[in-house]
Image (cartoon, rainbow, N blue to C red):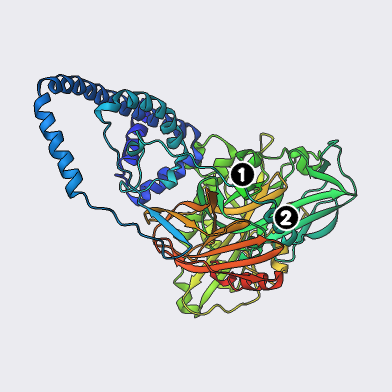
Amino acid sequence: MKNYIENTNLINAYLNNTLSGSERQAFENRLETDTEFKTLYNEQLAILEGINRIALKAEINAAKQNYVRLKWMKYIGVSVIAILVSALIYSFIFKKETPQTIEPANNNEIEVVSDSVIVEKPSEEKIEEEIVAAEQSKKEIKEKKEAIAPWEKTTSDDTTIEEIVIERPIVKELDPTSPELISFYKSVKKAPQIIEVNTEKEFIITCKEGTVLTIPAKSFVDVKTGKLARGKINLEVTEYYQLSDMLLGNLTTKSDDKQLETGGMLYLDANKKGKKLKLKSGKRIKMAFNNKGKKNMLLFNGEERNEGVNWKLESQEVDKPISVKKIFDNEIIEKDVKVSFSEIDEVPLFQKCKENKDNSTRRYCMENEILKFVESKFNVSIAKDLGLTGAHDITTYFVIETDGTIGEIKIRASRKELGYEMIRVIESLPKLVPGKQNGIAVKTVYYLPFEVLFKGETVKQLPITVRSDKSFDKVSTRLDSVRLVEELNRSNNRDIERYVFESMRLGWINCDRFAKTTNKKVKYKLKIKDSEGTNVKMIFKSMSSILPSTKRNGNYEFGWVPKGEEVILIAIKYKDNKIYLGKQETNTTTVSDLEFKEVTIQELKGELQKLNNSFK
């Protein structure tokens, strides 16, 4: 009961916007990971909605009573009203000014709409109509509340649910994407890299643009028959890291109505002699994106549509652990078996992470706690004595023993002093809850990429291996996480701290996070004359984000966007077998023109490639 009251008070504080920035962030993280807490949150919203509905009904009843009183007053004061009406007619005829018509200055019109919506009180003549409309709006209100994610809630100046109780949206006709434009995008899409692999053993692949894929043995089955694919297959990989590739692929960064910020996109497909394959149930592809630098990145799957790809957050089901039989091919688990943290049934834990119920949220909690511990304990002052400058990667492998203590530690770093400092920090970790495989406590190998950033220019150096006094067991293991990092090191010693995920699906895959901004939001709408066969996108300079537009009744609508952001509008038109490009740098509160020029395919690619450096 105490926890219920505390949680309810916390939710009310969040809804009333009385939490600090860090408290709000912690609250939103908890909503994403704690299913029971999210259920309580939704229940509290429903209760508040009911209270609002009662108040609304009371207001309507009061208005209805006023209507009755006014009706009798009209009968009594009919003569007075007649005089007033005569005066109003006289004023209307002789004093009304004729409004001026303002013509648009150009063919393009951007409409910026304020966040706030003014609600008019129902007039006396329409009280009965508003009572019916209010009841009909109940369902709309609920849907709008459910559509607002915790990370999208803004200040009290923004549109609120209460402000749109009476307002009913105008339904606009959605203009379909022209078949010619769809065919054009298919003709210019990026060609995949085709890799022949042997499915009888696990394989690790470094793709052309640096993505590293680790795929277990015997992972593919026929889509139609469900039979296991044996021997050699063709794996098709298309990487999207450049803005120009994304634009030509008609790709954007949006999940339903939520704006995303990308760290890279992939399209994966597989076939055997032309027969389409999919991943076998329980098998997972591990992928390291060739990108880094942003926190809280998540994995999204893409749903392909005519107007582009819509991204959906990867289901928690992909984090279900693979059983020990599938990892070790039915080998008997012995006392000294080491299991990768990414594959273990029950992950090792800090004591505070035991509160989480499922393994996926426990894994997330454990990773966060270890990173926070290292960041707080690592002594960065050693840079002064060593004269270090720029960024230094420290790759750490360590073993969590069956009793929860720290065992062997192996470090790869640019300087041995950095390695020894990391060993000191890892050895100071508190005793953990050990990991388990099939209910048996086993040793767990943990991989931790870490970057230390000092002032000055980064000077690349070959990594040095440093070990703790306890040596690693030299017995060969099948831990794909270790081999994955070794593959990354072989790739010209590129940045180790990448976005690493696992997926149980092929198709469209995107490394993203939900875009956050403190700016207020405005509605952005663009009108283009002779817009047949045109696709318009908005590119944000401050983040790796591309917003699509929806064409309704001849207008290109981007929905609610952050106010005052520097953006680039890109319009591609394909009509009568000719390509036209429109490009304009502007911001989300400025009216701008879009002038089209005819281009060849090569010229189009060249113009889009010039924008690649704008994508951060």
Quarter residue 395 falls in? bottom right
Judging depth in this view, the residue of 344 and 53 nearest the camera is 53
Front residue of 476/472: it is: 476
Q: CA distance from mark 2 to mark 1?
A: 29 Å
**Residue contact at pointers 2 and 1, CB within 8 angstroms:** no
Give the residue displayed 41% in from the left and 56% down from the top. 111
Of badges 2 and 1, nearer the viewer stands 2
Q: Is residue 15 above or below residue 109?
A: above
Going by the numbered disc 1, the residue's amino acid type is Glu
Query: Would residue 7 be visible to someone looking at this image?
Result: yes
Place residue 451 in its image quadrant: bottom right
For the residue labelled by badge 1, is the local secondary structure a helix, a strand or a loop? loop
Residue 281 at what x, y percent from top left? 75, 38
Residue position marked by numbered label 2 in the rendering? 183
| Quadrant in the picture for the N terminus | top left
Identify which residue is drawn at 66% across, 70% down: 604
Left or right placement of residue 74 versus residue 31 in this view: left
- Give, as a three-letter code, the residue at label 2: Ser
User: What residue did someone put label 1 on?
Assistant: 314
- Which of the marked residues, 2 or 1, is nearer the chain's N terminus? 2
Identify whether 585 is placed above or below 269. below
The residue that appears at 70% across and 71% down in the rendered structure is: 600
The reply, left or right, for residue 591 in relation to residue 471 is left
| x 30%, y 42%: residue | 118
Tell how many labels: 2
